[in-house]
Image: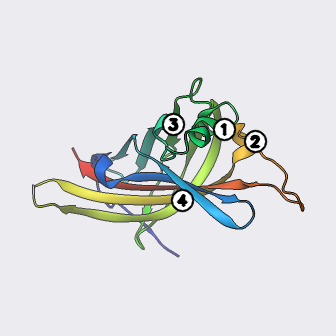
């Protein structure tokens, strides 16, 4: 059993060059398709009592799928992300606490396609240290699994011998390298 600690105090923002938000979904029943988003914003605020609040968003059009163009258009369409009507995916956490074994569990509200649901993500944290430029850096890595259908992403097609082309479980992974402000 771990106990909670105060790993860092203050406000930290994601270093976009060293942070990522990714997803993975079962494809054709034989492999896992992975992608990511390049435009993200995230911050972590840790109060003096150790209560940690995380918020962030990605621009859905910054998805890593660029070709073939028809595939990108399909994923950005109303059958998947519907970026014309819902350009961002966002998350707002409830207060969380880091554990002394470097683990963390963060609950909060995830919004995809204007559907907001409670999710819980688990992962790890790294305590702040000073970089060569005098900045304090820390990290949080979180993973959760959602049912994409709960967020209105229901597209699928049947495989000839049974089963679906696309899995329903969507794994979301967030890796934030944070810079203190």
CA distance for labels 2 and 3: 17 Å
Q: Which residue is mark 4?
A: 143
Closer to us: 24 or 159: 159
Marks 1,2: beta carbons within 8 A: yes
Q: Which residue is mark 2?
A: 155
Q: Earlier in the sequence, mark 4 or mark 1?
A: 1
Please indicate, yes or no, whether residue 15 appears anywhere in the rendered image: no
Closer to us: 82 or 7: 82
Q: Earlier in the sequence, mark 1 or mark 2?
A: 1
Q: Earlier in the sequence, mark 2 or mark 3?
A: 3
Above or below residue 170? Residue 103 is below
In the picture as drawn, the residue positioned furthest to the top comes out as 85
- Disc 2 or disc 4, which is closer to the eye? 2
- Circle 2 residues within 10 Å: few <14, some 14–19, many ≥20: some
Above or below residue 148? Residue 163 is below
Q: Earlier in the sequence, mark 2 or mark 4?
A: 4
Identity of the residue drawn at 24% across and 57% down: 137
Identity of the residue drawn at 49% across and 35% down: 61
Above or below residue 11? Residue 96 is below
CA distance for labels 4 and 1: 21 Å
Q: Residue 60's mark?
A: 3
CA distance for labels 2 and 4: 23 Å
Percent coordinates x, y for residue 2 in the rendering: 48, 73
Q: Residue 80's mark?
A: 1
Percent coordinates x, y for residue 121 in the rendering: 55, 56
Tell me the SS state at disc 3: helix
């Amino acid at each position: 059993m771990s106990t909670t600690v105060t790993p860092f105090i203050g406000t930290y923002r994601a270093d976009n060059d060293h942070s990522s938000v990714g997803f993975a979904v079962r494809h054709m029943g034989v492999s896992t398709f992975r992608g990511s988003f390049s435009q993200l914003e995230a911050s972590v605020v840790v109060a003096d009592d150790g209560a940690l609040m995380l918020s962030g968003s990605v621009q859905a059009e910054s998805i890593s799928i660029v070709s073939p163009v028809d595939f990108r258009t399909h994923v950005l369409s109303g059958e998947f992300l519907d970026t014309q009507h819902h350009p961002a995916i966002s998350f707002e956490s409830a207060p969380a606490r880091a554990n002394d074994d470097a683990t963390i569990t963060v609950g909060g509200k995830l919004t995809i396609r204007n559907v907001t649901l409670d999710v819980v993500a688990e992962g790890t944290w790294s305590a702040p240290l000073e970089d060569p430029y005098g900045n304090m850096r820390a990290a949080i890595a979180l993973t959760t699994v959602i049912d994409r259908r709960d967020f209105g992403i229901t597209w699928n097609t049947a495989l000839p011998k049974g089963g679906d082309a696309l899995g329903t479980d969507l794994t979301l992974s967030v890796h934030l390298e944070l810079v203190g402000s």
